[in-house]
Amino acid sequence: MMKHFPNMGRCVSILDRLMRMYYDRELADFEIGWGQQFYVEYLYDHPGASAQEMAECIRVDKATLTKAVKKLDSIGYVQIKKSEKDRRVKRLYLTDKALPAAKRIKEIHGQFFEILCSGIPPSDVRMTEQILQQMTENINQKVWHRMEEQNGII
């Protein structure tokens, strides 16, 4: 089984690089790229989410999240409001300026998915997604848990 990993790891790495290039090119007119699109989409789908909620869903550390939110704030894409229930919690909302970018991100997802899955039977695509989700969870339990321990989150 181990002899297959170098090829699988290489394919995942290549796919990641190609996705970054594709998204960066397609989002160039919106002052954001691959790194910020996750946050814009999350806030589009979950208006008023807290930073903690986003970090848990996207699986990023606090520093990475803070950097992304600062970038989005600096270009006028996000509005930060204190929660009315708990003044310590900040809620994040997309601004009107960010909405065209969010809608474009959704379009890009569809286009990329069509290209990615071209010629692959839908049942194989579903199976691949299930397998990738399980692989992600397998490694997440080892890596993310250690990161949380090291950063004093647990």
Image (tube, helix red, strand yellow):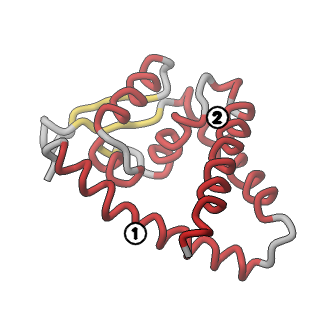
Callout 1 environment at 10 Å: few (<14), some (14 to 19), or many (20+)?
few
Q: Position of residue 32 (x, y in %)?
A: 59, 27
Closer to us: 85 or 116: 116
Location of mark 1 (residue) = 138
Question: Image height check: is 23 above or below 9?
Answer: above
Q: What residue is at 18 percent from the left and 42 percent from the top?
A: 151
- The amino acid type found where label 2 is placed reads Pro
Q: What residue is at 13 percent from the left and 36 percent from the top?
A: 88
Judge from the rendering whether residue 45 lies leftward or rightward of residue 93; answer left or right. Answer: right
- The amino acid type found where label 1 is placed reads Asn
Q: Position of residue 33 (x, y in %)?
A: 61, 31
Mark 1 and mark 2 lie on one chain; the one further toward the N terminus is 2
Q: Nearer the viewer, mark 1 or mark 2?
A: 1
* Numbered badge on residue 100: 2
**On-image quarter of the N terminus:** bottom right
Measure the C-alpha gap from mark 1 to mark 2.
36 Å
Judge from the rendering whether residue 63 lies leftward or rightward of residue 33; answer left or right. Answer: left
